[in-house]
Image (tube, coloured by chain):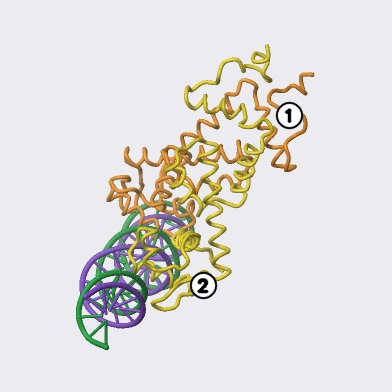
Chain colours: A orange, B yellow, C green, D purple
DNA sequence: GTTTATAGTTAGATTAATCTAACATTTTTA
DNA sequence: TAAAAATGTTAGATTAATCTAACTATAAAC
């Protein structure tokens, strides 16, 4: 099965996300979600139907097949993990993290995504809580220099 | 001026990168670099010419305008910085880091890129050399757990 | 300096993604 | 339940990006 385009991945993901809060899925809702017109949605649905990723009863409701649902969740998972990384680790603003996640989710490799996920988890499970070194990064990002008192390994200055 | 497509950015970047090692730029070289056929290049060159980003003498050489060169360098800078971050910080393999950089360079925001650059610089200028915490991340990525002896802040176990 | 090879261009097709305008169906409501 | 409103579909256009095949111009080689 040929790789989905960015656009089709967006439609799948939209359907998935809408279905998290909505019992039924309509063409109009997808159009609103993605900021496109309804004929574009109909076109995309046709393409997704051909690939066996959605089922659509004419003039009626719409749902993902198992295969479609799996793919949609994969894309959305990337979205969420990218968001966490950008916002939670790098300190990118909320809105920009979302926007970037939305774009990059279609292009990042499994390998890089896995490393990012691990990195986020590494920070989140840090035994010392919010890591000192990440506080230092925030300081560095803000002031353009490392915080004073950490010129050699360890925390010798602090401990003294 | 309307935003460039991913494709046109790739052409600009290709021309820039080729020009780093080649005195003259030819359609054929661009085609080879981007793995496309020459008519596709001619088409793209036409689009870039319209936007005032390249100059092309028919059947002859080709060069970037100042504006084109600036844009090309911006894209290529993103490429290099993404590569450094993926490969150098996250530990993504060389080939995948390159591939991902190639894709993501067209989509990442200035804000997120700036934070990644700062992060890389933060690590590179770390007073202790290669940071302990990054060693810990590598350990974590490999073994799925934090290294032993760092259950509380500081390096108390190591110092003892 | 012709011929041959290489490189570049044009023409025309295809696929994807979008749109507007017109039409069809379904749902709401008076 | 018939008219109006909302929603969905189809038809047809546009833009971008690619391709193959055919043609043209320049460069190389004999």
Question: Exactly how many numbered labels are in the figure?
Answer: 2
For image coordinates 55% across by 28% down, the residue present is B137
For image coordinates 71% across by 39% down, the residue present is A140
Farthest residue to the right: give it: A160
For image coordinates 48% across by 61% down, the residue present is B9
- Left or right: where A15 falls relative to A120: left
Q: Position of residue B107 (x, y in %)?
A: 51, 52
Q: Spatial distance from mark 1 to mark 2, Cα to Cα?
A: 50 Å
Please state which of residues B90 and A118 is positioned toward the viewer in this rendering.
B90
- Left or right: where A65 falls relative to A143: left
Q: Which residue is mark 1?
A: A150
Q: Are marks 1 and 2 on the same chain?
A: no
Dividing the image into 4 quarters, which one contains the C terminus of chain A?
A: top right
- Left or right: where C8 falls relative to B98: left
Asked if D30 appears above or below B103 in the picture, the reply is: below
Picture quadrant of residue C10: bottom left
Q: Which mark is residue B51?
A: 2
Picture quadrant of residue B151: top right
Under circle 2, the secondary element is loop
Subunit under mark 1: A
Q: Position of residue A30 (x, y in %)?
A: 44, 51
Subunit under mark 2: B
User: Mark 1 and 2 residues: CB-CB less than 8 Å, in contact?
Assistant: no
Q: Residues within 10 Å of mark 1 (few under 14, many from 20)?
A: some
Please state which of residues C7 and B41 is positioned toward the viewer in this rendering.
C7
Asked if B148 appears above or below A23 in the picture, the reply is: above
Under circle 1, the secondary element is loop
Q: Position of residue A29 (x, y in %)?
A: 45, 51
Can residue A106 be seen here? The reply is no
For image coordinates 62% across by 18% down, the residue present is B150
């Amino acid at each position: 099965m040929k790789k989905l385009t960015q656009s089709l991945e967006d439609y799948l993901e939209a359907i998935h996300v809408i279905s998290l809060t909505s019992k039924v899925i309509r063409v109009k809702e997808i159009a609103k979600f993605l900021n496109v017109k309804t004929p574009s949605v109909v076109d995309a649905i046709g393409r997704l139907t051909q690939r066996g990723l959605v089922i659509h009863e004419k003039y009626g409701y719409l749902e993902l097949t198992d295969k479609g649902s799996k793919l949609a969740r994969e894309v959305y998972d990337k979205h969420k993990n990218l968001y966490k990384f950008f916002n939670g680790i790098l300190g990118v603003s909320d809105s920009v993290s979302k926007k970037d996640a939305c774009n990059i989710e279609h292009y990042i490799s499994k390998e890089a995504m896995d490393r990012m996920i691990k990195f986020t988890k590494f920070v989140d499970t840090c035994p010392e809580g919010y890591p000192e070194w990440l506080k230092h990064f925030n300081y560095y990002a803000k002031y353009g220099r490392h915080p004073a008192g950490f010129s050699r390994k360890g925390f010798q200055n602090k401990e003294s």
